[in-house]
Image: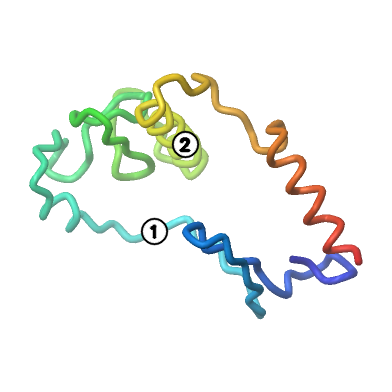
Amino acid sequence: MACKNHEVIERVELTNHETGETSLLPIDEVIINHGYERDTSLLENSELDIARINEYYIAGNSMNESSIDGLYAAGDILQYEGKVNLIAGAFQDAANAVNKAKQFIQPDANKIAMVSSHNDIFKKRNKELVKQMIR
């Protein structure tokens, strides 16, 4: 949540999705980390027979699907023909992977992802948050 001059974030709202309880946590800084360390220990220790390329990358496709039904990958760990290994490509991978996972979990879900600003539920919640910020 921003302070009255909207220049800094002073606190974040945390929600316990099991209980619905919310709380405010005061913060000094917001650090956004898009990742930079490569760690394959999860893959190496997996009991799943995930197809890999060069014993590192998850072999997949442009829809972020791996060789395991329902397992999706994104970012530097995913490799497929035509893959762009840039941060912008990783962000697209993440959006595609989440959308594919959504469709796997809920097959009747909308096949086209939408940004939160075009989602009526988010619009309503965002309006409420803005009202709280400018009090």
Picture coordinates of residue 19 (x, y %)? 51, 62
**Mark 1 sits on what residue?**
36
Q: Nearer the viewer, residue 105 or 83?
A: 105
Q: Residue at x 48, y 45 (%)?
A: 87
Mark 2 to mark 1: distance in Å? 14 Å
In the foreground, 52 or 25: 25
Closer to the chain start, of discs 2 and 1, is: 1
**Quadrant of the rendered image containing residue 59:** top left
Q: Is residue 7 above or below residue 65?
A: below
Residue at the spot of label 2: 89
What residue lies at 49% left-to-right and 36% top-to-bottom? 95
60, 69: nearer the viewer: 69
Q: Quadrant of the N terminus?
A: bottom right
Image coordinates of residue 21 in percent, x first then y, are: 58, 66
- As helix, strand or loop, the secondary structure at mark 2 comes to helix
Amino acid type indicated by mark 1: Tyr
Residue 50: image x %, image y %? Answer: 14, 37
Classify residue 104 by image quadrant. Answer: top left
User: What is the quadrant of residue 23 in the picture?
Assistant: bottom right
